[in-house]
Amino acid sequence: MPPETPKRKGRTIEQRSIDPAAQAMLIRADELGLDTAFTRAEQMAPCPIGANGTCCRVCFMGPCRLVKDGQTGVCGATVETVTARNFARAIAAGAASHSDHGRDLAFTLLAVAEGEAQGYKIRDPFKLKKLAEELGIPTDGRPVSELAHDVGEKCLAQFSQQRGEIAMIERAPKKRKELWRKLKMVPRGIDREIVDILHRTHMGDDQDPEHILAQGMRAALGDGWGGSMIATDLSDILFGTPSPLVSQVNLGVLRKDEVNIVVHGHEPTLSEMILAATSDPELVSHAKEKGAKGINLAGICCTSNETLMRQGVPSAGNFLHQELAIITGAVDAMVVDVQCIMQALPNLAQKFHTHVITTSPKVKITGAIHIEFDEHHALDIAKEIVRKAIDNYPNRGEVNIPDVKSDVVPGFSHEYINYMLGGSYRSSFRPLNDAIMSGRIRGVVADVGCNNPRTTQDASHEYLVREFLKNDVLLVETGCGAIASGKYGYLLGEAAMQWAGPGLREVCEATGMPPVLHMGSCVDNSRILTVLSQVVAEGGLGEDISDVPAVGIAPEWMSEKAIAIATYCAASGAYVIMGISNPVEGSPVVTDVLSRGWEEMVGGKIEFVVEPEEMVRRALGHIDKKREALKLPAYDPERFGRSGDWRVLELEQLSPEERAEALYGQPASGD
Ligand code: NFS
């Protein structure tokens, strides 16, 4: 049966978003009679057949809509085959998007090595050398440019490789690699596995749902341990490996009296140069000539995560903020590259003065200005774009910037987490493992993924973070989920004092780290794979990723990339919960394959859970089950929290007599 279409008409502002900045802009949009994704979601009932995965469009004898029990398509395709095929195709598209992003960075690295990439340089030569060694490239006495060249070529070869295994799979725990090899699941080449999915889901090919979905895992692994991992590593090498810094998040980072340029999309390559161009003295004085006090750069979506965690460029918000930023009337140019860019932007921008500028050779949007980016002339192109924004500043009409922003401390690369916990002379994951083993940290949850206007913006992200912190669960975050946490103050050390349970609070006090670690953009979910592998290698938490008390959750997901991520995490042994709705709901068999079937096969699984309360219940249940299997002490918050800053604050509340009693077990001796 198709699921009942939820009624969404007439949602209140609070039902649309919990973010006060978004609420203010949604009220403004209503006043101006403007549509946004929020209102369009209310007007557009999702097609129930597509929503549960039972619409087959792979050939033109259809499309076939399988709505009755036992019904098949014209070719005889069953509901199991159709839902599995649709799911696998979503994995292919998601993996292609992340991986193509990684490929472009390999081209940029090559151009830098050849001295042809204007304005770029190698920011982390140590990471370059380390990666070169890992890829079997000789490093002794060789200049950085030669290493960059060889690493660039070797990374590119990962995409086109036809046989063997992709290289970065070596980072996985031994037991995991053995399992993948046994199941013939190690990706041969990143592109090959994606093409394989498109081939086998063509009309008249693979019709066994489990078999189709196993190839889905293989292609997704090529994303997580291939394309995305390459994207992360090469971004660090080119733009710097992140370490914590202070910045701000939300629409309040836009400035009334400065030229505002918002970079939106995913690749750090162009935004890096735009940042450089905003401090060009000639352009700054041009901005002043136009009456602005300066040039302000802000980000949206994962471009924002890239520039936020490396250069501290403030974030104007997550996915559902792209239209809201334009509605402030203060954005002089919104510069986009690839992925998650709503087609509604140019139309909306016409109602204001904003230029929407597309820059990728892969992305043109009708109504937008196209200034194509080329890394060989990056700085010149970036300056042209910035100049266009400045020239647009005098065209502003009424400006309404909500005065809402929060401080954040993002930038927790796996290298930094290692260093933070162990110090520079003995960087190690030992303290993290010990904290989990002792029960100070009950487990780890990765809260990641998008916003989706079918649910209240940020509500699930915020609720989950609060509940997990209370339960001494350490959070690691990427993508739009990480920006959501930033908005509500969770990406700060102080959040541990306010929200964390006693054990987690002790750990945060000792290290100064926030209880929610911003680890980057969505391709940086690969960092989470690396952390999990290093946690396993450190010892004491099992021999495989599937042994670690950890869960991944994408409560407000909307993109095919989220499906690819969920799949590679599950194929790597993690328990993954996805919110919103079940895209294979039409087939109980396929729903069962993704959960019970995959758990038996690879130790990880995907479950679709709509209610955040249920997500928390299942995630904690899983964490406790894994703790028990590892024979770790059962989680008991009573054992911790009697030390550190919290204890000092508590003691300060007491009278001198009570304090002496609490400290020494006897009242202070009077004179
Ligand atoms: Ni991820 Fe980043 Fe956000 Fe979702 Fe889109 S920006 S790659 S897909 S919406 S988290």
Image (tube, helix red, strand yellow):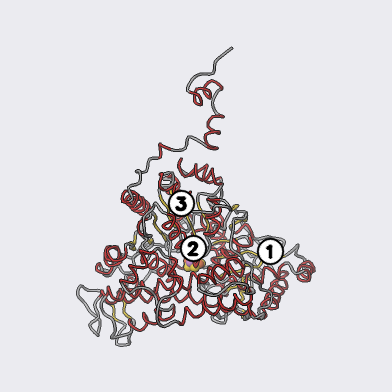
Looking at the rendered structure, the kind of residue marked 1 is Asn
Looking at the rendered structure, the kind of residue marked 3 is Val
Instruction: Indicate if the residue with disc 3 has its beta carbon within 8 Å of ligand 1.
Output: no
Checking the image for residue 465, the label placed there is: 3
250 left or right, relative to 13: right
User: Under tag 1, what secondary structure?
Assistant: strand
468 left or right, relative to 244: left
Where is 408 relative to 185, above or below?
Answer: above
Residue pictured at 59% horizontal, 75% vertical: 147
Which residue does the numbered mark 1 point to in the structure image? 296
Which residue does the numbered mark 2 point to in the structure image? 527
Q: Name the front one of labels 2 and 1.
A: 2
Asked whether residue 353 is in view, the answer is: no
Q: Quadrant of residue 470?
A: top left
In this rendered view, identify the residue nearer to me: 425 or 72: 425
Residue 546 rendering spot, x and y as whole percentages? 35, 59
Mark 2 Cα-neighbour bin, 10 Å: few <14, some 14–19, many ≥20: many
The quadrant of the rendering that contains the C terminus is top right
Report if the CB atoms under discs 3 and 1 are less than 8 Å apart: no
Cα–Cα gap, marks 3 and 1: 31 Å
The quadrant of the rendering that contains the N terminus is bottom left
In this rendered view, identify the residue nearer to me: 640 or 328: 640
Residue pictured at 26% horizontal, 80% vertical: 207
Cα–Cα gap, marks 2 and 1: 30 Å
Marked residue nearer the N-terminal end (2 or 3): 3
349 left or right, relative to 592: right
Residue 594 rendering spot, x and y as whole percentages? 30, 66
In this rendered view, identify the residue nearer to me: 105 or 490: 105
User: Under tag 2, what secondary structure?
Assistant: helix
